[in-house]
Image (cartoon, grey):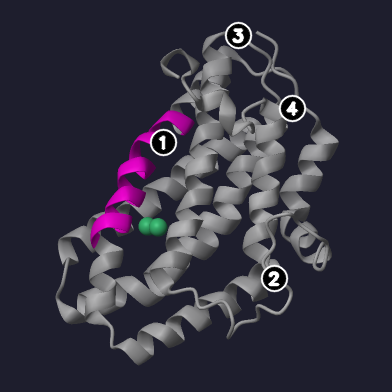
Amino acid sequence: MEIRSDFGRRAFLRRGGLLLAVSLAGCAHPMKPAKDEGKEGTGISPPEDLMREHGVLRRILLIYEESIRRIDTDEALPLDSVADASGIIHDFVENYHEKLEEDFLFPRFKKAGTLTDLVNVLTKQHNAGKRLTKTTLSASEKKGPLSPEDRSRLKESMHRFIRMYRPHASREDTVLFPEFRKIVPPREFEELGEEFEEREDKAFGKDGFFKVVGRVEMIEKRLGIFDLQEFTPVSVL
Ligand SMILES: [Fe+2]
Ligand SMILES: [Fe+2]
């Protein structure tokens, strides 16, 4: 099986991902919100903010699935795509999104004595996810063709990540986040939404979320899974 890699590009994307996001501040993007939507104009609640971040996570799970399919069918797999996708998981999902959950949500549930068992499981899964991402990153950054052992390690780490994060994000969306609204006073809830937006801008530049989505789209295009219409089952139309 041929697994192609572009190390210069990959190194740029991995090391400069955050810088890229910052340096592109002000560049037009088709999905970018209206110009005057500042931190007080977005009106995005904490759950909505976290759920759209789950949207980014789910799109990366699709990238991992396509990568596994290519490994299974001996199709060329550009390793820089996997490295870039797992880099976004590392920078955006683990170091940003999960940190918000751990700093602002989980302690409030513990203090309220609500859903504490669920919070314990979610915390353990964050830690397990970080270990899997470390494996995915190191396997996808190898120089030269991957050995059969490396291929199977890469495939296994992506597979286990997908298996854990689908139920993880779904449980947060349907159980944790709806309950969060109930345990936080309205004023504090609103302020947290603003706090999340400010942190996002600080970490990824203004409209940082849309820049991250743009990076995900680039990977999808490289792997030929960007066109949504391709997912429609034509036979039932
Ligand atoms: Fe989480
Ligand atoms: Fe989450």
- Which label's residue is closer to the chain start, 3 or 2? 2
Q: How far, Cα to Cα, is label 4 from label 3?
A: 19 Å
- Which label's residue is closer to the chain start, 2 or 1? 2
Q: Is mark 4 on a helix, strand or loop?
A: loop
Q: How far, Cα to Cα, is label 3 from label 2?
A: 44 Å
Q: Circle 2 sits on which residue? A: 34
- Residue 64: give x, y in percent of width and height: 53, 31
Which sits in the foreground, 51 or 61?
Answer: 51
Q: Which mark is residue 162?
A: 1
Q: Circle 4 sits on which residue? A: 143
Q: What element carries label 3?
A: loop
- Residue 39: give x, y in percent of width and height: 61, 82
Q: Is residue 53 left or right of residue 114?
A: right
Question: Which image quadrant shows ligand 1?
Answer: bottom left
- Which label's residue is closer to the chain start, 4 or 2? 2
Which sits in the foreground, 57 or 149?
Answer: 57
Give the magenta part as a residue range: 158-175
Does residue 20 lie above or below 84 as drawn? Answer: below
Q: How far, Cα to Cα, is label 2 from label 1?
A: 34 Å
Q: In which quarter of the image is the C terminus?
A: top left
Q: How crowded is mark 4: few (under 14 residues within 10 Å), some or many (20 or more)?
A: few
**Which residue is pictured at 38% across the width and 44% down the height?**
165
**Which residue is pictured at 61% across the width and 15% down the height?**
147
Q: Is mark 1 on a helix, strand or loop?
A: helix
- Residue 180: give x, y in percent of width and height: 28, 73
Of badges 4 and 2, the one in the foreground is 2
- Which label's residue is closer to the chain start, 4 or 3? 3
Q: Circle 3 sits on which residue? A: 74
Q: How crowded is mark 2: few (under 14 residues within 10 Å), some or many (20 or more)?
A: few
Q: How far, Cα to Cα, is label 4 from label 1?
A: 25 Å
- Which label's residue is closer to the chain start, 4 or 1? 4
Q: Confirm whether residue 141 shows in the render.
A: no
